[in-house]
Image (tube, grey):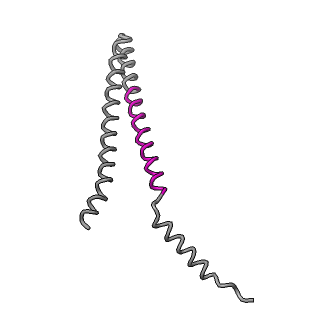
Amino acid sequence: MSEPDHRHKLADLDARIAAAKGAPDSEKTLAQGYSSAEVGWRMVTELVAGLGIGLGVGYGLDVLLGTLPIMLVLFTGLGFVAGIRVMMRSARDYQDRLAGAQDAPAEDEKRD
């Protein structure tokens, strides 16, 4: 018995692989979704960290100075403002990165 010729099966497999590589990559779209979620969680974490640090510093100063609510409220507010500023900077950086990614293919088309 001779072995069957698998060349046509291999050629068919190569054609399917080439077609899959040429098709729009659904993993890139999925990765962009994860990227957006990652940026969102990063911004939430920055806000919570700013609040936590402000709360900790304010409480520590209140205990040391004996002025319980004053420094706590002041530094919690400052931590909130700092967290918002860092969030806005992160959002601006992400927006600039997306705009740059969208402009890059348009520039390539102009050269052709």
Q: State whether residue 46 is above or below residue 67.
A: below
Q: Nearer the viewer, residue 88 or 49?
A: 88
Image position, residue 68 (x, y; %):
38, 11
Figure disc tally: 0
**Is residue 70 depicted above or below 89 in this figure?**
above
Q: Residue at x 47, y 66 (%)?
A: 21
Residue at the outermost top position:
67
Look at 45% across and 42% down and name the residue there.
Answer: 37
Where's the C terminus, which quadrant? bottom left
> At x 46% / y 59%, what residue is drawn?
25
* Residue 30 x, y percent position in the rendering: 48, 51
User: Residue 28 colored magenta?
Assistant: yes
- Depth check: give the residue in front, 37 or 25: 25
Q: Quadrant of residue 95?
A: top left
Using the image as rendered, state which of residue 27 and residue 24 is in the foreground.
24
Q: Which residues are magenta?
A: 26-51
Image check: 15 left or right of 3? Answer: left
The secondary structure making up most of the magenta span is helix
Question: Which image quadrant: the N terminus?
Answer: bottom right
Q: Is residue 7 left or right of residue 46?
A: right
x and y, in percent, of residue 9 in the image: 61, 78
Identify which residue, 41 or 103, lies in the foreground: 103
Residue 62: x %, y % from top left: 37, 14
